[in-house]
């Protein structure tokens, strides 16, 4: 199922399909390792519901839902 | 042999620790020209000929963030002899991503893999020799915190400089990209040095605007290149920049598992368990409030406050240093003016600086613990949603909180905000919070004008509300001006693993913050204190006077007090009190005391309450209070603003903005208030105009804001 990262289910694993957005945003997201083909674990939301916390390449990242909207993901089954 | 080494690496990679370990006390901290990003330079402890330049912590060399542009401009234009690239061994993949870009610049790179002790503890294995082979550069394992491996690191850097280093590419991109790059190389060969040819060519392929501007290629040639890049982009359904980024990561992915053998034991488990509580959906906010309360309680109310009071009242009080020096000078029959300039001017000025130090020490220590332990990043995570509404970020909370104690550490706490525009806004607005020294002014006005009134208890809380509201309004207004228009930057941040703060690096950090404050702010405060002392103790005929009414300052006050008439308090005493408040806000009450004929008044000025109520109405008194709370802060804080802004121009902009805001808000409050009592004058017209302008500035569309899709 193709979706954007901000709508991913908490506690689910997914794979990045594509990164969209204006150049500065896109570049920054990709610089942080959010590259197509990368596995992402969606850990939790902040107490107020935004931003979100994800695990990528062994480290925890936090990003706003508004930015996560640019990341297109495909859900994958738990290993 | 003179040598320049640039230190580059990701945030949280231990760069500052390594820099401290290498340079010890031989540091010079300033700002990069024209921006509020810290520039640190130091001489190597063991060899003063070697200069280390600490570049800002970055993830990439993209052209979009200020820190990254500073770093790459330095590397490309200033030609450091060697780059030491410090990488966090436990997060190899993302760290090596920057490494591949640094190597591409053509400057020789030495890799320092840090936190080897942590890696050893986790029983992970890093194969440094293999990394060295793949990336064609020396790799040294270090533990910066224990200064382990730092000597070998410097030796490797020196050896690399002396060797006959020849740049050769390590990352090879796809055949089609390489073909295009080869053609770009031919076109720009004459324009750049051979070592940097590949870097510039790749940037042209990435359509890096800054590089294209510098190269200034013939538009026709550029057009033909862009044509080919576009074809490649269409074929691969992404832009050239993203394709390069993907290939860089793919290159690292191909070998990272061979060089980093991870033990199965999940070491992040502890961090996750802590986070289950600290960023818990229900507990996260209450725990945050508790921690903040503790920090505030320790730094401002108890330990720090106590120490600051001690310095102010005992060491620099009447019975302390000033008393001792006075009695010496009297014993020597020194001229009275010399006594004055020494005791009131210089010692008073030094006291104003040193008095803040204990509080700042405790505060910076606690903030350092929060930062080092990894909790500060969680605060941003928890609060971001609230602060974003006002164009601020999750980290804006700290400067505001700290400023309720003292604006100086508040301004300095703005450092923790990564984004330069937000940092500037915070530096300019954080002193709107009523600091400890402004409390006596609040007590004076509440006591003198609102005593027994049903709203007396509201005066103090209203001051805090006004502070917060003014910060929010200012932030909204400032963000709509070009100088503050934030580039579209996403909020994406690492949440580092929790770890215990290390005493040594913590103390080092605090020490340097305090030292730079004393050095920079001290000189300004001292000079200004002497000048104001002179103005308030001498007459126009340069006679030392007893009656402050004859002083130069009073003379100036009487001339310029008309400026404050529209605010309802155009009398020279209030004007002079406001001016002396620039030295330290505590002075406002004391000055009123002196001007009304009391040698000494209590902190809240109870002695002059009756006299004050003759010259003021409640409304004009409140307008006076508002002006003094919001206008330019004390000179010590202005010194801190100058230090943090790193530019005279921006310091003046800050002072001008603060004073302007103070004037306009006080004008609106006084004039609109007067209209409610049925008085309508020409002033009311200005009041209404000011209100309309303010509302316009708040609600006008922001033409610099990025379009949200």
Image: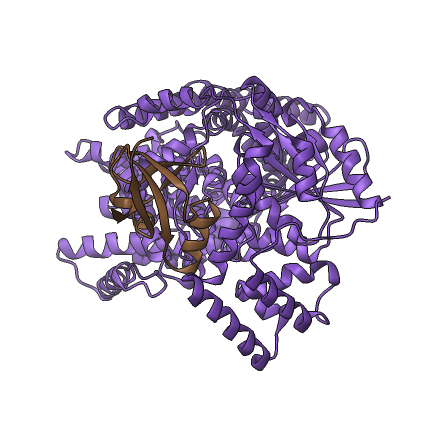
Name the residue furthest front: B175
Q: Quadrant of residue B259?
A: top right
Q: Is residue A59 above or below residue B307?
A: below
Name the residue furthest bottom: B220
Q: Is residue B634 above or below residue B605?
A: below
* Image side of residue A35 versus residue B614, left or right: right
In this rendered view, identify the residue nearer to me: B228 or B429: B228
Q: Quadrant of residue A77?
A: top left
Q: Quadrant of residue B600?
A: top left
* Rendering coords of residue B458 (x, y %): 21, 35
In this rendered view, identify the residue nearer to me: B208 or B507: B208
* Rendering coords of residue B68 (x, y %): 55, 51
In this rendered view, identify the residue nearer to me: B178 or B551: B178
Judge whether residue A59 can be spotted in this image.
yes
* Rendering coords of residue B575 (x, y %): 41, 49
* Image side of residue B617 versus residue B176, left or right: left
Q: Is residue B675 above or below residue B56?
A: below
Q: Quadrant of the C terminus of chain B?
A: bottom left
In this rendered view, identify the residue nearer to me: B642 or B178: B178
Q: How many numbered marks have been drawn onto this rendered protein structure?
A: 0
Q: Which chain is purple?
A: B
- Residue drawn at x 59%, y 53% is B70
Q: For chain A, give the colour.
A: brown
Q: How is the image coloured?
A: by chain
* Image side of residue B494 versus residue B696, left or right: right
Q: Quadrant of the N terminus of chain B?
A: top right
* Rendering coords of residue B640 (x, y %): 53, 42
Judge whether residue B32 can be spotted in this image.
no
Q: Is residue B63 above or below residue B643?
A: below
């Amino acid at each position: 199922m193709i979706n954007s990262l901000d709508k991913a289910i908490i506690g689910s694993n997914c794979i990045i399909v594509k990164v969209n957005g204006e150049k500065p945003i896109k570049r920054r997201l990709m610089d942080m390792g959010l590259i197509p083909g990368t596995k992402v674990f969606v850990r939790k939301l902040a107490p107020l519901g935004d931003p979100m916390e994800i695990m990528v390449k062994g480290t925890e990242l936090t990003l706003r839902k508004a930015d996560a909207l640019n990341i297109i993901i495909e859900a994958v089954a738990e290993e | 042999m003179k040598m320049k080494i640039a230190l580059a690496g990701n945030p949280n990679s231990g760069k500052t620790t390594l820099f401290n370990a290498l340079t010890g006390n031989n540091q010079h901290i300033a700002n990069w020209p024209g921006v509020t990003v810290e520039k640190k330079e130091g001489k190597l402890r063991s060899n003063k000929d070697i200069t280390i330049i600490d570049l800002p912590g970055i993830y990439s060399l993209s052209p979009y963030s200020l820190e990254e542009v500073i770093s790459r401009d330095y590397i490309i234009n200033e030609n450091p002899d060697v780059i030491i690239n410090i990488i966090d061994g436990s997060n190899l993949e993302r760290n090596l991503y920057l490494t591949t870009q640094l190597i591409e610049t053509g400057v020789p790179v030495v890799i320092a893999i840090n936190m080897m002790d942590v890696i050893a503890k986790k029983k992970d294995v890093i194969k440094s020799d293999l990394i060295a082979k793949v990336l064609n550069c020396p790799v040294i394992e270090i533990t910066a915190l224990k200064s382990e491996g730092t000597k070998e690191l410097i030796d490797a850097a020196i050896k690399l400089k002396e060797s006959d280093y020849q740049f050769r590419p390590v990352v090879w991109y796809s055949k089609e990209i390489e073909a295009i790059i080869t053609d770009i190389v031919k076109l720009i060969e004459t324009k750049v040095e051979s070592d940097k040819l590949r870097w510039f060519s790749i940037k042209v392929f990435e359509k890096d605007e800054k590089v294209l501007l510098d190269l200034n290629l013939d538009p026709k040639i550029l057009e033909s290149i862009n044509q080919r890049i576009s074809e490649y982009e269409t074929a691969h359904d992404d832009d050239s920049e993203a394709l390069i980024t993907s290939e860089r990561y793919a290159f690292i992915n191909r070998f990272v598992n061979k060089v980093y053998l991870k033990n199965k034991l999940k070491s992040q488990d502890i961090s996750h368990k802590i986070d289950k509580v600290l960023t818990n959906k229900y507990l996260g906010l209450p725990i945050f409030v508790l921690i903040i309360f503790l920090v505030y309680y320790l730094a401002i109310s108890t330990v720090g406050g106590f120490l600051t009071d001690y310095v102010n009242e005992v060491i620099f009080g009447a019975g302390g240093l000033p008393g001792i020096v006075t009695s010496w000078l009297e014993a020597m029959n020194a001229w009275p003016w010399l006594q004055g300039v020494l005791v009131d001017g210089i010692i008073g000025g030094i006291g104003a600086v040193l008095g803040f130090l204990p509080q700042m020490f405790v505060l910076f220590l606690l903030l350092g613990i929060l930062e080092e332990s990894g909790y500060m990043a969680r605060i941003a995570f928890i609060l971001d949603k609230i602060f974003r509404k006002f164009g601020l970020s999750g980290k804006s909370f700290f400067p505001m909180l700290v400023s309720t104690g003292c604006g100086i550490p508040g301004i300095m706490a703005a450092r923790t905000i990564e984004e330069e525009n937000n940092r500037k806004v915070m530096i300019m607005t954080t002193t709107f919070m009523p600091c400890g020294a402004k409390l006596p002014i609040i007590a004076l006005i509440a006591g003198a004008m609102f005593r027994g009134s049903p709203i007396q208890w509201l005066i103090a809380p209203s001051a805090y509300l006004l502070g917060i509201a003014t910060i929010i309004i200012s932030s909204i207004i400032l963000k709509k001006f070009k100088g503050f228009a934030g580039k579209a930057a996403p909020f994406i941040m690492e949440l580092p693993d929790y770890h215990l703060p290390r005493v040594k690096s913590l103390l080092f950090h605090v020490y340097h913050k305090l030292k730079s404050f004393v050095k920079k702010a001290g000189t300004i405060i001292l000079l200004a204190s002497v000048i104001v002392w002179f103005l308030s103790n001498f007459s126009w005929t340069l006679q030392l006077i007893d009656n402050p009414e004859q002083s130069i300052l009073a003379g100036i006050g009487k001339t310029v007090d008309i400026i404050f008439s529209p605010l309802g308090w155009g009398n020279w005493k209030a004007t002079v009190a406001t001016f002396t408040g620039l030295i330290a806000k505590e002075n406002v009450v004391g000055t009123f005391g002196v001007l009304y004929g009391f040698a000494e008044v209590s902190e809240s000025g109870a002695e002059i309450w009756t006299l004050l109520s003759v010259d003021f109405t409640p409304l004009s008194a409140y307008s006076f209070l508002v002006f003094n709370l919001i206008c330019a802060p004390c000179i010590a804080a202005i010194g801190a603003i100058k230090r943090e802004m790193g530019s005279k121009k921006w310091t003046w902009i800050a002072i001008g903005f603060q004073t302007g805001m103070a004037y306009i808000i006080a004008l609106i409050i006084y004039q609109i208030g007067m209209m409610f009592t049925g008085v309508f004058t020409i002033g009311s017209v200005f009041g209404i105009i000011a209100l309309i302008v303010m509302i316009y500035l708040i609600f006008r569309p922001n033409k610099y804001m990025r379009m949200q899709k």
